[in-house]
Image (cartoon, rainbow, N blue to C red):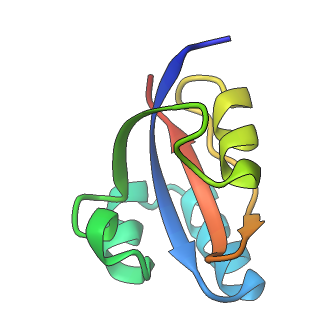
Amino acid sequence: MAAKVKCSHILVAKQSESLAILEKIKKGEKFGKLAKEFSIDTGSGKKDGNLGYFTKGMMVKPFEDVAFKLQIGEISEPVKTEFGYHIIKRFE
């Protein structure tokens, strides 16, 4: 397992929103464009959802568990945390 990963995410308040955005991604819309448009994470949302590199212990556990299991280029199903619903894309 990787010591660190590089991911982007889209964070929204409702599960229904996350599922609708995931459908848009599956239909070919760009992850970064959707992050800018819909993500409520004002920091990463402006950067196409880019969170940069992080190691274990830096993110909340449900998010981290999924991020470290994704393959490079893979996009997660919605992940619920205390902050809302995340769609995660792993880059490295």
| Residue at left offset 55%, top offset 23% | 72
Image-based side of 47 in relation to 1, left or right: left
| Residue 75: image location, x then y, percent | 62, 44
| In the rendered image, the vertical position of residue 39 relative to residue 62, given as above or below | below
Instruction: Say which of 68 and 22 sits in front.
Output: 68
- Asked where in the image residue 81 lies, by quadrant, the reply is bottom right
| Residue at left offset 55%, top offset 15% | 3
Residue lying farthest to the top in this orientation: 1
| Residue 87: image location, x then y, percent | 61, 59
Q: How many numbered callouts? A: 0
- Asked where in the image residue 12 lies, by quadrant, the reply is bottom right
Residue lying farthest to the front in this orientation: 57
| Residue 53: image location, x then y, percent | 38, 33
| Residue 91: image location, x then y, percent | 44, 30
- Asked where in the image residue 21 lies, by quadrant, the reply is bottom right
Instruction: Say which of 82 and 10 sits in front.
Output: 82
Instruction: Say which of 79 and 24 sits in front.
Output: 79
| In the rendered image, the vertical position of residue 45 relative to residue 57, given as above or below | below
Image quarter of the C terminus: top left
Image quarter of the N terminus: top right
